[in-house]
Amino acid sequence: MIWMASFPKHILETQQFKEGKLIENLFSLASEMELFDTPLCKLSDEQIDRSEKLVLPCKPRTRVLANLFYEPSTRTRFSFSSAMKSLGGDTIETESAGHFSSAAKGETLPDTIRITSGYADVIVLRHPKEGAAKQAARYSSVPIINAGDGTGQHPTQALLDLYTIKKELGRIDDLKIAMVGDLKQGRTVHSLAYLLAHRDKMKMYFVSPEQLKMRQDIIQYFNEKHIDFEELADMKDIARVVDVLYMTRIQKERFGDNAEYEKVKDAYVLDERVLDLMPLDSIVMHPLPRVNEISPSIDGDRRAAYFRQAINGKYVRMALLKMLLDPPAEYI
Ligand code: NCD
């Protein structure tokens, strides 16, 4: 297998995407994936030639992606499956791996990874323990993609978030972004914050209840990189100035004490009253699933970008899989 000098072997955390060129290449490939994800009969001969270069080769057998999920998922698991199938590859799957894989019999993660990497060309791992993907990478003979490790990171979500910002706003620098909700336990905001820390002219607002403030490692990273940020409690204070309002779910399953969850569960609800304050050319994002934090009554507003965001996940994941398994010559 050929590894590009600059493209990481494993996708574990967004600090791996410091290079502007990496992001640029990945997003350009994702746009191509999007363009060619069209029924064959609708493509011109020229487009068919190009799209054939983009699918993964299926000789002597097609490439296989293993979805190894120890926590629930809809978007991440389906979009990886759909991405691999659109590339001409195949998938093997286990949802609720804690119950349905040999983990239920006491098998350790390193052993499960050793075995799975013998059956697959890439492993997509979601696990409740922070650091699980890094641990898996040490035992895997094939690339590991971190699809969420507890309260740690979810790097492919952050990449699709940034791709969405680029598609929606036409730029990924010079932005005012507010992250709202469970900034302590929400892994998507951890990954996105690390990724945004490498963009130019960023202004970040971390909006959360006192007990769910952004993790210290990220605050420290922002301080070291001299990124302009503020921590605050009320999203109405910044709704008028943001380009992106990134809402998150309060992570109920991560609270040791349900009474603590009850205290903060409805801390933020984005409805017309808040949306009305926001600029007309701003967007609302959410990794989904949502609970109460975005009122369905705003779904029809064109600033509501969260369903478009979820669709973009497929194309960024196609691009990532292509780069990991069979990078097109011009992207190396
Ligand atoms: C997120 C996750 O699993 O971290 N969902 C996703 O992958 N789109 C967000 C969440 O569960 O709140």
Image (tube, rainbow, N blue to C red):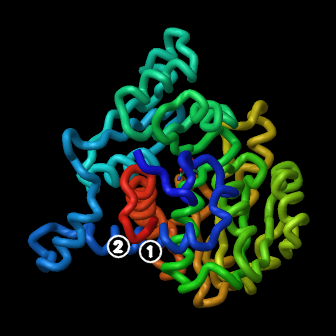
Give the residue type at disc 1. Ser
Residue drawn 44% across the image and 52% down it: 324
117 versus 248 height, above or below: above
**Most foreground residue, 324 or 34:** 324
Please give the residue where the numbered disc 1 appears in the rendered image: 28
Disc 1, SS: helix
Image spot of residue 246 (x, y percent):
65, 67
Mark 2 neighbour density, 10 Å: few (under 14) some (14–19) many (20 or more): some
Q: Left or right: 35 with respect to 261?
A: left
Q: Residue furthest top?
A: 105
Labelled disc at residue 185: none
- In the figure, 51 relative to 130: above or below? below
The spot of residue 303 in percent (x, y) is 54, 80
Q: Residue 205: x, y in percent?
A: 79, 71
Vertical comparison of 325 with 143: above or below = below
Judge whether residue 297 can be spotted in this image.
no
The answer to whether the residue labelled 2 contacts the one labelled 1, judged by CB atoms less than 8 Å apart, is yes
- Quadrant in the picture for residue 139: top right
For the residue marked with disc 2, what is the amino acid?
Answer: Glu
The crowd level at tag 1 (other Cα within 10 Å; few <14, some 14-19, many 20+) is: some
Please indicate whether residue 75 sits to the left or right of residue 268 in the image: left
Using the rendered view, name the quadrant where residue 54 is placed.
bottom left
The residue furthest left is 41
Along the viewing direction, whichever of 323 and 200 lies nearer the viewer: 323
Any mark on residue 32, and which?
2
The quadrant of the picture occupied by the N terminus is: top left
- Give me the residue at 55% from left, 57% from top: 5
Depth check: give the residue in front, 35 or 127: 35
Label 2 element class: helix
Residue 208 visible in the snapshot: yes
Residue shown at 65%/89% (left/top)?
279
